[in-house]
Amino acid sequence: MILIISCSHHPESRSRLLANAIDKAVIALGNTTHFLDLRTMPLPLCDGHSTHENREVLKARALVKSAKGILLSTPIYNYGANAITKSFIENTGPSWNGKPVGMLCSAGGKGSYMALMPLVGSLMLDFHCHVLPRHVYALTNQFQEDRIIDTELQERITLLASDICWLSQSLAERQVIK
Ligand SMILES: Cc1cc2nc3c(=O)[nH]c(=O)nc-3n(C[C@H](O)[C@H](O)[C@H](O)COP(=O)(O)O)c2cc1C
């Protein structure tokens, strides 16, 4: 199962459109998915202590643990992933150990194109995630209302879907062989 996490609470979120599009692309490649819209999961802010017993936190951790690969789709806020994304990762931490991860984001301008790098570094160094080097970075003008209108963006989504399926399959096979 590939877990797709949509991290925006905006009612007309563009990163959610990216998450929906990659969900379809992963399914088209013959994989099962679980679509997690974080609007439906009221997680507490992590305090590193009492939140460990929270029911939603335990649910989130189990979901991450059971995934063969993870696709994270986030808005860019203040030159980084939004706080909802950060909070999800803080709450689920070690469940990410060794997971293959692909990233998608929607931004207001081109200038934030390196914005996901701190998160990528943290996932790699803290949790030894295999983060795909090519991520999807989408701009406002590549959407019209609730549609992706840019063919290059759609192609990048399809490519990322294929990359995460390949990587998660390869890692799963390697673990079986070991
Ligand atoms: C609080 C806030 C901070 C933002 N900061 C940035 C930023 O640093 N760089 C950028 O390119 N866009 C920034 N934006 C624009 C959003 O990334 C853009 O609207 C994106 O589509 C939001 O994702 P969503 O539609 O999935 O909610 C910001 C928007 C908000 C509301």
Image: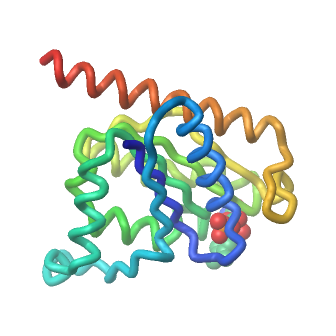
Position above or below: 166 against 93:
above
Q: Residue at x 61, y 38 (%)?
A: 25
Name the residue furthest top: 177
Viewer-proximal residue, 57 or 83?
57
x and y percent of residue 4 in the render? 47, 52
x and y percent of residue 75 in the render? 60, 64
Judged left or right of residue 55, residue 67 is right
Position above or below: 15 against 68:
below
Position above or below: 91 against 135:
below
Q: Residue at x 38, y 40 (%)?
A: 69
Judged left or right of residue 59, residue 22 is right
The quarter holding residue 68 reads: top left
Judged left or right of residue 137, residue 73 is left
Position above or below: 142 against 88:
above
The quarter of the rendered structure image containing the N terminus is top left
x and y percent of residue 31 in the render? 46, 35
Viewer-proximal residue, 90 or 71?
71
Q: Residue at x 37, y 31 (%)?
A: 168
Viewer-proximal residue, 125 or 58?
58
The quarter of the rendered structure image containing the C terminus is top left
The quarter holding residue 48 reads: bottom left
In which of the image's four quarters is ligand 1 placed? bottom right
x and y percent of residue 115 in the render? 57, 54
Q: Residue at x 50, y 31 (%)?
A: 30
